[in-house]
Image (tube, rainbow, N blue to C red):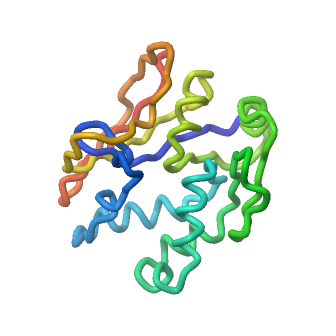
Amino acid sequence: MRKLVVFNNVTLDGYFAGSNGDISWAHKDSQDAEFNAFVAENANGGGLLVFGRITYELMAAYWPTPHAIKNDPLVAEGMNSLPKVVFSRTLHQASWNNARVMKSDMVAEVRKMKKEPGKDMAILGSGNIVSQLAQQGLIDEYQIMVNPVILGQGRTMFDGIQEKLTLKLTKTRTFGNGNVLLCYGLMA
């Protein structure tokens, strides 16, 4: 059975996006070779990318561009070549390479996709998707990259969670740029 993993950058005060949707703080210039290698490896790990409309539109507007391909060729290659599913009630078509729009019941579709053979699935950004699927117990692993930034206000990826989710720390990793990766799974 395929796993569903969330990978998101968050600030030290717990926001994955500023109040105006800004995420530029998570993509600051980094001279940390170890961190850059980690990002490139993750982007080329294979699997299926899962997005909501807003995150899809942000990613599709950047990764296929000559600027992205020049500045971050390994990550751009992975992002552009991986298959993508966009859950949206308003988006009619997806123009980014290997992307398709799904308008049907997201929870039922994710349950079905998890049972299919293949590599794991990853949600990037997409806070509304994360909170809906988390409430249904469909997320197997949370990979949270804590950035040494404080915004003071913004959006958490868990807005709307109705019941407490108890998680178990499975792995940590620190980087020279101050970022800390925290990986959590559901408690058994």
The reply, left or right, for residue 17 in relation to residue 188 is left
The reply, left or right, for residue 40 in relation to residue 105 is left
Whole-percent x and y of residue 185? 46, 28
Q: Is residue 185 above or below residue 121?
A: above
Q: Viewer-proximal residue, 188 or 94?
A: 94
Q: Residue at x 74, y 44 (%)?
A: 89
Whole-percent x and y of residue 151? 23, 46
Q: Residue at x 62, y 71 (%)?
A: 80
**How many numbered marks have been drawn onto this rendered protein structure?**
0
Q: Viewer-proximal residue, 44 or 23?
A: 23
Whole-percent x and y of residue 168? 39, 23
Q: Residue at x 71, y 35 (%)?
A: 1
The reply, left or right, for residue 89 in relation to residue 66 is right
Whole-percent x and y of residue 61? 56, 70
Q: Is residue 83 above or below residue 73?
A: above
Residue 10's quadrant in the figure?
top left
